[in-house]
Image (cartoon, rainbow, N blue to C red):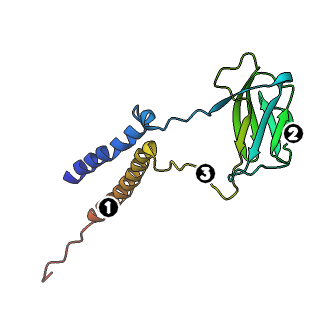
Amino acid sequence: MTGCKTFRQVIVLLAIPAVVAHGPLAWAAQPIAAQPAVTDVSLKERGTLQGQIVNAEGAPLAAAPVVIWHGGAEIAKTTTDPQGRFQISQLRGGIHQLLAAGVQKNVRLWTAHSAPPVAQGSLLLVANRDDVVRGNFHGLGAGHCWQTLGAVSLIGLLAWGIYEIADQDSDTGVVEAEAAPGS
């Protein structure tokens, strides 16, 4: 019976990390998703957005495509000149997404009369380099370590339980009595 009691104690101890990983504390351990940065830009006359695209070394990118999205739809497109400059007219105020040279930039466009003091007069974008890989690995981050520990604990518990059951079955086998001498 002590084996059964020990088995129950081990189950409880190993289940605690799994419960914590999926319980009320799990949401507190999860990383908070960063909100995308929005750059304020003041439009010129006729709703014109001006900007320049350069590479990582600061050299201008010529003939780079520039696309403006608003509300999930493409609303304007152009390419940069030999100095990496671009200009798109007939834009309205609001939040837009600008895609150019491997960069996605969220911009809040303002008319010249309503722009806050922090608004830029033009936009400077630095193109992503093809040989640079950016990213984050959260596989063993704060929230996942408890989930991983819980999963490993449960797998170990199952393996140990199967071993114990198999061991008990072999212990309860029928023992044959030997014949008495002289019979």
Judge whether 117 appears above or below 154 on screen.
Answer: above
Residue that appears at 74% across and 52% down:
59
The part of the image, by quadrant, that contains residue 87 is top right
* Amino acid type indicated by mark 3: Arg
Cα distance in 3D space between marks 2 and 3:
27 Å
Q: Residue 56 location, x and y as percent?
A: 68, 52
Who comes first in sequence, dot 2 or dot 1?
Answer: 2
Q: Which mark is residue 122?
A: none
**Labels 2 & 3 near each other (Cβ < 8 A):** no
Who comes first in sequence, dot 2 or dot 3?
Answer: 2
User: How many marks on residues?
Assistant: 3
For disc 3, the neighbor class at 10 Å (few under 14, some 14 to 19, many from 20) is few
Viewer-closest of 1 and 62: 62
Q: Which mark is residue 78?
A: 2
Viewer-closest of 169 and 9: 9
For this view, does 90 lie left or right of residue 52?
A: right
**Labels 3 & 1 near each other (Cβ < 8 A):** no
Cα distance in 3D space between marks 3 and 1:
55 Å
* Amino acid type indicated by mark 1: Asp
Q: Residue 20 location, x and y as percent?
A: 37, 38
Q: Which residue is mark 3?
A: 134
Q: Which mark is residue 169?
A: 1
Residue that appears at 26% across and 64% down:
171
Who comes first in sequence, dot 3 or dot 1?
Answer: 3
